[in-house]
Amino acid sequence: MGTSSARRGPSTRLWRRAKAAATRYLSPESAGAVEAREVVARYLAALKETGAQGDERGLAAFRLTRKVAQKLGDFGDRASSRGWEAALEAWGLEGMTGQPPEILAQALSASLIGSGGGLEEAVLRVSLATVLGQHLPREGGASAVPSPTLLLEPGQLVREFLGSVLYTRLVLDLGESLEAASRGASRLRLGLEGIKESISQAGDLALDESPAIGQWAGLAGWVWVTKVLETLLSRLSQENYAL
């Protein structure tokens, strides 16, 4: 079994420790011995180890993620400042305004990510569809036509997306260990909710204001997305678990 970064699963010391922490986190015999934030911290240490040499910030494993996050910010910016139809048209989705939010979320995911079939692309599609599905507005039911704006400003939308990507990658990479240790769907669900909450809390802390209108597609957007992700990873990695 591989990981979200490679099809062949790594067997280094840090990956073994990450999987062991995931097992102890949900194992009934060691209840309370490992908290969700330790699972996340050990996972990030292992992920950083498999990244580009010398990448101390752990960003190398998320290069495509940052590109898509910047595109998502640009889409949200266009929807807020130029209108819903203009935003859809900019990403090749003319005539989609009458589609239900779920269909629009899938179409936007395909447009923002492209046709790549890699493992990271698969994670991004799941995360984009999840976040967009939650924040595309509904008026009168699931089949209603979305209104001209998203329910979140572009910066917050991007923050949620980055957190969702990290959570989805962790579940993909450590899911086998988590599921085997949980011995039941209820315990697994509660454990995953704890991990998701740990990531969400780190992402909720205040950051600099997001790029100005019309600046998302340029250097300002890229720098801001990189800073947000770097801050998120740093906060989640700061615990010392003798990695």
Image (cartoon, rainbow, N blue to C red):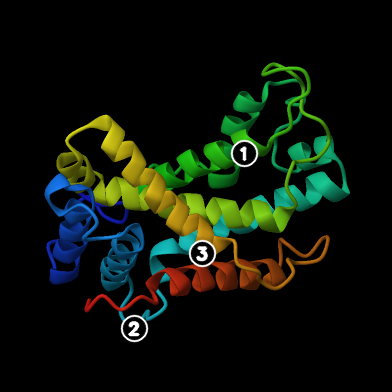
Which numbered disc, 3 or 2, marks the residue closer to the eye? 3
User: Can residue 36 be seen in this snapshot?
Assistant: yes
In the image, taking residue 197 as reference, residue 222 lies left or right, namely right
Give the structural element (helix, strand or loop) at label 3.
helix
Q: Earlier in the sequence, mark 3 or mark 1?
A: 1
Identified by mark 2, the residue type is Gly
Residue 202 position, x and y percent, is 51, 64
Q: Earlier in the sequence, mark 1 or mark 2?
A: 2
Q: CA distance from mark 1 to mark 2?
A: 34 Å
Q: Which mark is residue 132?
A: 1
Q: CA distance from mark 3 to mark 1?
A: 21 Å
- The amino acid beneath tag 3 is Ala
Which residue corresponds to the image point at 44% horizontal and 62% vertical from the top-left? 62
In the image: residue 57, left or right of residue 211? left
What residue is shown at x 58% (from left), y 42% (from top)?
A: 131
Check disc 2 and report the residue beneath it. Answer: 54
Front-most of 145 and 51? 145
Q: Which residue is mark 3?
A: 202
21 over 168 or under it: above or below = below
- Inspect the image, locate mark 1, and give the three-letter code of the amino acid beneath it: Leu
Residue at 65% x, 69% y is: 206
Q: Residue at x 44, y 58 (%)?
A: 198
Name the image quarter holding residue 141: top right
From the viewer's side, name the closer residue of 61 and 242: 242
Dot 3, crowdedness within 10 Å: few (<14), some or many (≥20)? some
From the top left corner, tell me how far across and down residue 236 is, in percent: 42, 68
